[in-house]
């Protein structure tokens, strides 16, 4: 009899295995185990040469962050964790801001308005697409 082996899910962005944060694992440190570089060592700079400190580094892709909260939010892109759920339809999101935009579907609210033609949108990305498609000069 053959036993089924469950292969890990692969992150579509980084092409790395997704780690389930709900299971304790020695290879997935919690945020309180993540440390910045020792004092005096060179710290990675932000794009554009900014001097903002990037003390917290993603162990999956090496991207640096200035706070553990920012790192934690970023880690969800690798783990697939979606802690924010819609109380109307149950759809889940990895970031609260995306849930907030999603709620406009249920309320009918369209808070994002085109400054050129007054069309309104529920999602800011749809407003940007509209502006590029209809109002950009070629």
Image (tube, rainbow, N blue to C red):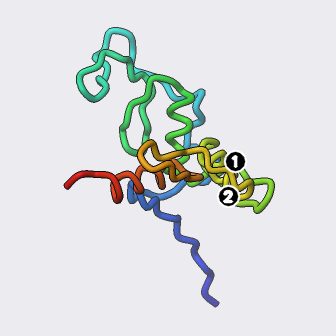
Of circles 1 and 2, which is in front? 2
Q: Is residue 27 visible?
A: no
Task: Identify the mark at residue 70; answer none if there is no mark.
Answer: none
Q: Can you give x and y, in whole percent of width and height, for residue 122 in the image?
A: 59, 52
Q: Is residue 1 above or below residue 28?
A: below
**What residue is rendered at 45% in x and 42% in y?**
115
Q: Quadrant of residue 54?
A: top left
Considering every residue shown, the one lying at the far left of the view is 138
Q: Earlier in the sequence, mark 1 or mark 2?
A: 1
* Mark 2 nearby-residue class (10 Å; few <14, some 14–19, many ≥20): few
Q: Quadrant of the C terminus?
A: bottom left
Considering every residue shown, the one lying at the far front of the view is 117
Numbered disc 1: secondary structure: strand
Q: Can you give x and y, in whole percent of width and height, for residue 81 in the image?
A: 62, 51
**What residue is rendered at 28% in x and 51% in y?**
136
**What residue is rendered at 52% in x and 65% in y?**
9
Considering every residue shown, the one lying at the far bottom of the view is 1
Q: Is label 1 in contact with label 2 (beta carbons under 8 Å)? A: no
Q: Nearer the viewer, residue 92 or 81?
A: 92
Q: Can you give x and y, in whole percent of width and height, for residue 110 in the image?
A: 62, 50
- Residue 5 left/right relative to 135: right
Q: Which residue is mark 1?
A: 84
Considering every residue shown, the one lying at the far right of the view is 87
Q: Which residue is mark 2?
A: 105
Q: CA distance from mark 1 to mark 2?
A: 16 Å
Q: Can you give x and y, in whole percent of width and height, for residue 37 in the image?
A: 39, 20
**What residue is rendered at 41% in x and 56% in y?**
130
Q: Is residue 110 above or below residue 62?
A: below
Numbered disc 2: secondary structure: helix
Q: Quadrant of the N terminus?
A: bottom right
């Amino acid at each position: 009899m053959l036993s089924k082996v469950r292969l890990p899910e692969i992150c579509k962005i980084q092409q790395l295995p997704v780690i389930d944060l709900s299971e304790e694992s020695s290879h997935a440190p919690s945020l309180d185990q993540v440390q910045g570089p020792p004092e005096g060592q060179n710290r990675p700079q932000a794009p554009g040469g900014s001097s903002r400190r990037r003390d917290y580094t993603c162990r999956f892709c090496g991207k640096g962050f200035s706070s553990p909260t920012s790192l934690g939010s970023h880690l969800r892109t690798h783990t697939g964790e979606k802690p924010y759920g819609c109380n109307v339809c149950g759809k889940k999101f990895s970031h609260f801001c995306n849930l907030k935009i999603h709620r406009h579907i249920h309320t009918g609210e369209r808070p994002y308005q085109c400054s050129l033609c007054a069309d309104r949108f529920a999602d800011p990305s749809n407003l940007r697409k509209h502006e590029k498609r209809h109002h950009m000069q070629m």
